[in-house]
Image (spheres, grey):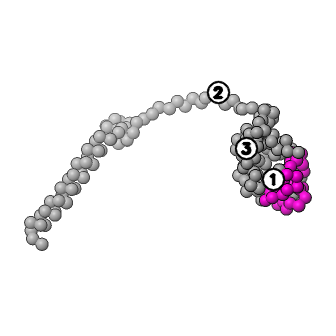
Amino acid sequence: MDTMKLTKIVGGLCGALLVYLLISWAATSMYQMGGGGHAEGEGMTGYKIEVATAEATEEVAEGPSFNDLLASADVAKGKKVFSKCKACHKTDDGANSTGPYLFGIVDRPIGKVAGFSYSSGMSGIGGNWDVATLNKFITKPKDFISDTKMSFSGLKKETDRANLISYLMTIK
């Protein structure tokens, strides 16, 4: 390799480095924020923002109770919500599927459908499927009965639960 080729290569690398340093310096000076020699802000970047520490005195108003929602529930909307349950539950009397049938579920004993194999937690809980119990269970089944076979994650919206329970109350 001759001296002229080597000089061109080194010159190209130095030129590229110089361009990189100039772009870096320009970007730093254009976008640098904060500090600039102030006693408190020396070496800092960004802006100081004062935040009011006073707590809000207003309380968040709670919505209607579940019983109020149930009283004004829409059965047609509940039937739409039931579409999430259709894969595992049937509404025909005695027609078990992956889950037990839901015909007459409201006020029926918990875990006592003939011909369906419940988990020990579900069959041992006792009591009836009243509105309050159904609401708790449908919210998040695994929280209500930890060893339930039901893999459904639950219904978060209270209005959806009220509509669904209203629909289930009509299946008799």
Circle 3 SS class: helix
Residue at the disc numbered 1: 90
For the point 79% across and 59% down, which residue is it?
98
The residue beneath circle 3 is: 80
- Tell me the amino acid under the disc marked 1: Lys
In the rendered image, residue 117 lying in the magenta stretch gets the answer: yes
Dividing the picture into quadrants, the one containing residue 12 is bottom left
Q: Which structural element holds mark 1?
A: loop
Nearer-the-camera pick, 18 or 49? 18
* Observer able to see residue 65: no
Q: Earlier in the sequence, mark 3 or mark 2?
A: 2
Q: Quadrant of the C terminus?
A: top right
Disc 1 to disc 3, how far (Cα)?
A: 14 Å
Percent across and percent down for residue 102 are: 84, 50
Q: Is the stretch drawn in magenta largely helix, strand or loop?
A: loop
Binning the other alpha carbons within 10 Å of mark 1 as few (below 14), some (14 to 19) or many (20 upward) gives: some
Residue in the picture at 39% in, 39% down: 46
**C-alpha separation, residue under disc 1 versus residue under disc 2:** 47 Å
Is residue 24 magenta-colored? no
What is the spatial separation of the Cα atoms under label 3 and label 2, in whole angstroms?
Answer: 37 Å
As drawn, is 167 to the left or to the right of 16?
right
- The disc, 1 or 3, on the residue closer to the chain's N-terminal end is 3
Please identify the quarter of the rendering in which residue 120 is found: bottom right
Q: Quadrant of residue 159?
A: top right
Q: Quadrant of the N terminus?
A: bottom left
Q: Which residue is mark 2?
A: 58
Q: Are the residues at dot 3 and dot 2 in contact (C-beta closer than 8 Å)?
A: no
Q: Residue at x 83, y 56 (%)?
A: 100
Magenta span of residues: 92-119
